[in-house]
Image (cartoon, helix red, strand yellow):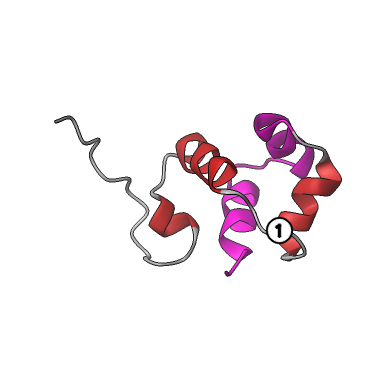
Amino acid sequence: MNFSRIRNLREDKDLYQKDIAKVLGISQQYYSDYESGKRIMPITHLIKLAQFYQVSLDYLVGLTDISKPYPRYNP
């Protein structure tokens, strides 16, 4: 997985790793390991980041270059 996108999103918002770590409820070092690719980010954290940045999961993980989230499914 290309982790540059989560770093770019954070930097585009002028946020620090500690800010995002707080959103996720983890330490700054733990989050730093996500950005560097040393640790795999669980889906729960990916979902929180996608919601926080208001982007789709596909965009967050680099499967698409379209950042707009999909419409919510309401059966």
Image height check: is 15 above or below 42?
above
- Say which residue appears at 85% left-offset and 47% top-offset: 29
Q: Mark 1 highlights which residue?
A: 35
Q: Residue at x 21, y 36 (%)?
A: 73
* Rendering coords of residue 33 (x, y %): 78, 56
Residue 27 placement (x, y as % from top left):
82, 38
Query: Measuring 68% from the left and 38% from the top, which residue is drawn there?
Result: 20
Q: Is residue 56 left or right of residue 43?
A: left
Q: Is residue 72 magenta?
A: no
Tell me which corner region of the image, top left, top right, bottom left or bottom right, holds residue 65: bottom left
Horizontal and vertical percent position of residue 63 = 40, 67
Asked if residue 36 is positioned above or below residue 52 in the image, the reply reads below
Quadrant housing the N terminus:
bottom right
Circle 1 packing at 10 Å, graded few (<14), some (14-19), many (20+), is: many
Along the viewing direction, whichever of 22 and 38 lies nearer the viewer: 38
Q: Residue at (75%, 64%) from the top-left corner? A: 36
Secondary element at image label 1: helix
Residue range in magenta is 1-25
Quadrant housing the C terminus: top left
User: What amino acid is at disc 1?
Assistant: Glu
Q: Nearer the viewer, residue 45 or 55?
A: 45
